[in-house]
Amino acid sequence: MKIAIGFKLIEGPFGGGNQFVSSLSKFLITKGFDVVFDLKDNDIDIILITDPRKYIQSCSFDILDAIKYRQTKNKNVKIIQRVNECDERKKSKFVNFQIKNSAKLCDKVVFISNWLGDLLGQNLHFEIILNGADKKIFKNYNIQNKSDKIKFVTHHWGDNFQKGWDIYLKFDKLLDKPEYKKYEFHYIGKSKYMSYSKNIIYHKPTHGVELAKLLSSFDIYVSGSINEPAGMHHIEGALCGLPVLYRNSGALPEYNLNFGVSFNDEHDFEDSLYTISKSYKHINMKKYPNDSNKMCDEYLDLFKSTIKLSNKNSPTLIGKLKNWLFTRIFFKILYRFGIE
């Protein structure tokens, strides 16, 4: 089997999509499958669309390219779209529309959380496969916290305010209080909002084993992300043995239930922080299930089942393609003017 993944892998620290493609491609290769990242070969069995927005940095091809490939090179190829984004996450305006238009032309659609499927899966036949990080890298390195303080941490590649900066800056202000001197809060990654912080301890972006060892040196992970489709950050923290203090928003509850303490917003964050600071040592993180082996096994099952399907033969396919070609041009113009 040969699988084409529509993603441009990037070396070094990058977003969760990069971690997903890295894990999946390595897994497939070890299983004896061929993996490519373009549509040059004539014998591709599965095309995996990772994003409908061809104009973004990480996208190497989109649904229009995939349909053209089916028509001109291999009529038996199957097309799957993985959905890991939505307008609600970054307050963008047209991402949902592009996702839905692209998904209608695919043989199968997979969402990375039930929350995202409920949001965008209307009138689609879809499957849910939860994200998972590489447990060979992200594991508990048993690095002891030598400080007498309880050390909290979060890490993000993107610097959108929706990543949880209302909570992180709330925590920053709490650290001014005398009763909070027993806590530390660390941020790993990039963010323009660090300039508003007084007490958050900053670490430059890192990845791989270096990141995993750094995470393992803390006590509790924090995610204040709003409308998170799934993410990788809290998964990596959990696999490193850190109970998660997570926002009751997006997919965070379905990933972290029984592995931390939730909060709703700034109003109850302080109470939840106090609760987890008293209970985190009693949360068994060894049973945390979301690793890349589980995720990749499920994608392989998806690929095998999709191969057996007959190709879609919709009588309105040409009309849909014309619509998609128009929208792709339209949204590329919007993107150039900074409208996502």
Image (cartoon, rainbow, N blue to C red):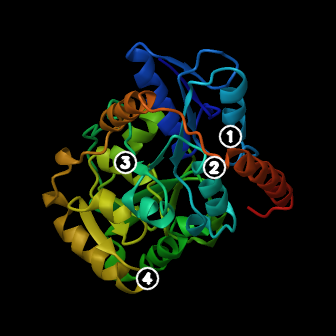
- Mark 2 or 3 closer to N-term? 2
Which disc, if any, is residue 278? Answer: none
Say which element carries label 1.
loop
- Mark 4 to mark 1: distance in Å? 39 Å
The kind of residue on which mark 1 rests is Asp
Residue sitting at the far top: 32
- In front: label 2 or label 1: 2
Instruction: Find disc 1 in the rendering and name its residue.
Output: 62
Mark 3 crowdedness (10 Å alpha carbons): few <14, some 14-19, many ≥20: many
- In front: label 4 or label 1: 1
Residue 32 vs 319, above or below: the answer is above
- Mark 3 to mark 4: distance in Å? 28 Å
Please tell me how many numbered marks the rendered image carries.
4
- Mark 2 to mark 1: distance in Å? 8 Å
Residues at badges 4 and 1 in contact (C-beta under 8 Å)? no
Say which element carries label 4.
helix
Does residue 51 appear in this view? yes
Q: Picture coordinates of residue 135 (x, y %)? A: 32, 35
Instruction: Find disc 3 in the rendering and name its residue.
Output: 130
The kind of residue on which mark 2 rests is Ser
Q: Quadrant of the C terminus?
A: bottom right
Instruction: Find disc 4 in the rendering and name its residue.
Output: 266
Residues at badges 3 and 1 in contact (C-beta under 8 Å)? no
